[in-house]
Image (tube, rainbow, N blue to C red):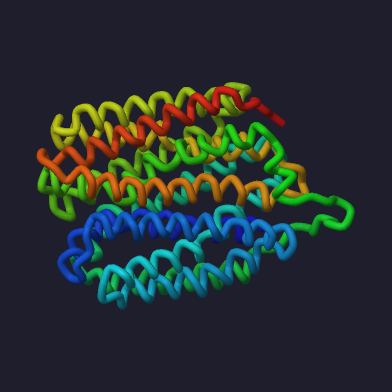
Amino acid sequence: MRTGIVFLVLGYVLSQFYRAFLAVMTPYLAHDIGTTAESLAQASGFWFVAFALAQLPVGWALDHVGPRLTASVPLALLGGGGAVLFALAQGPGAITLAMILIGAGCAPVLVAAYYIYAREFPPQMFGTLAGLSIGFGSFGNIAGTLPLAWAVAAFGWRPTVLGVAAVTLLVAAALARFIHDPERVDHAAAKGSVRDLLREPSLWLIAPMMVAGYAPAADIRGLWVGPYMADVWHMGANGIGRVSLLMGLAMVAGNFAYGPLDRMLGSRKWGVFGGNILAMGCLAALGLWPDAGPWAGALWLAALGFVGASYPAVMAHGRGFFPPHLVGRGVTLLTLFGIGGTGLMQVVTGRIHAAVAVPPASAPYAAIFLFFAAFVAVALVLYAFSADRMD
C-alpha cells in the first residue's frame, strides 16, 4: 500500500504539472500555433472542468471498484493520450481538446489517495496526509516553472511534452502494479448516495471555500502569472519561469503548513478562515497596485501562494461529515466543487481579460485580482456559518 501511495503522489505531481505548465508555454504556443491569452485561459479552464465532471463517476468507482483500476486506467488512456495530442497540436482547438483529455485522466489520482487515507488510516491523520500529498505533489507545479522553461529551450516544446507523456504512461503502469484496494464496504448493508451528502447544510457552506481556498492561487499560477509578467513587465520565458518558481515554492510550503494546522489549533475551520483573510489581502494588494514593480508583484504572488493553499485543510473539514461507505463519493463531491469552480473561474477571468483590454497594460490583471479578492470575501462570509467538526 505504501508503494502504491508513493506512485499516487507521483501521479499527482503530473496532475499539478499539467494544470500549471501553460504559463511558461505561453510565448512558444503563441508563436508556433497562434494561441492567445484568452484561448489558453479557456483551455486551462476546461482542464479543470473536465477534472471536476469526472469526479462523480470516479467517486462511484472508488466505492465499488477500488482505487487501483480507477486511478491507473484513466491516467494511461486519457492523461497519456491527451499529452500526445498536445505535443502534436497544430492550433488552439487541439490544445483545448488535449487539456480536456488530460484533465479527465488526472481526475482520479488525488482522490484515490484520499480514499485510501480515509479507509486505512486514523481519521485524525487525514488532514496531515492530505496536506503532505498536495505538498509533495506540488513539486509538479515547480517542474512546470523554470525547469520546464529550460527543457523547452533545449529540446523544443513538442519533444518535451512527448517526454512527459511517456512518464505519465509509466506512472499509470506502476499504479496498476502497486496499488492494493482496501477491503470492500458492504454496500448492501450500508445504503446511501450523493443525495444523502447533499442534505448536510454545512457542506453547502464549505463548498464555496473549496473554490476560494484553491482557485485564486491555482489559476494565477497556472496561467495569469505568465501574461501578467509578459504584458506589464515584458519578461521572457526565463523571467516568467523564475516568478512562477517563486510562487510555486510558496504554494508547496503552504500545503505543508496547512496540513497539521487542524491538530495544532483544535479546529478545522478557523485556520482556514484566517489564512483566507490573508489571501484576500494579497489579492487586494495586487489589484490595487498592479504597477508597483515586477518583484513587488512577485512577492505578493508568493505570499498568495502560501496563504492561499488551504485546499487540503478545507477537504479535511468536509471529510468529517462523510460516513465510511460514502467516503469515495464524498471526497470526489468536494473535489467537484473545488476543481470545477476553479475551472469556471479560469474561464470567467479569461472573459474579464478580454473585456478590460484598455490601457494601461496592467488594467486587465488588476480586474482579475480584484475579482478573485471579492470572491474570497463572499466565500468567507458563507464559511463563517459552517459547523466546525473534529474527529
The residue at 77%/46% (across/down) is 324
Question: Closest to the observer: 40 or 174?
Answer: 40
329, above or below 209, in the image:
below
110, above or below 384, in the image:
below
Q: Quadrant of residue 123?
A: top right
132, above or below 146, in the image:
above
Question: Is any atom of residue 120 visible in this view?
Answer: no
The quadrant the C terminus occupies is: top right
Q: Position of residue 29 (x, y in %)?
A: 22, 65
Q: Position of residue 251 (x, y in %)?
A: 39, 40
The residue at 51%/67% (across/down) is 171
Identify the residue at the far right of this view. 189
The residue at 48%/31% (across/down) is 379
Question: In the displayed structure, does residue 387 sit left or right of residue 42?
Answer: right
The quadrant the N terminus occupies is: bottom right
Q: Position of residue 338 (x, y in %)?
A: 51, 45
Q: Position of residue 223 (x, y in %)?
A: 30, 51
Question: In the displayed structure, does residue 328 sit left or right of residue 85?
Answer: right
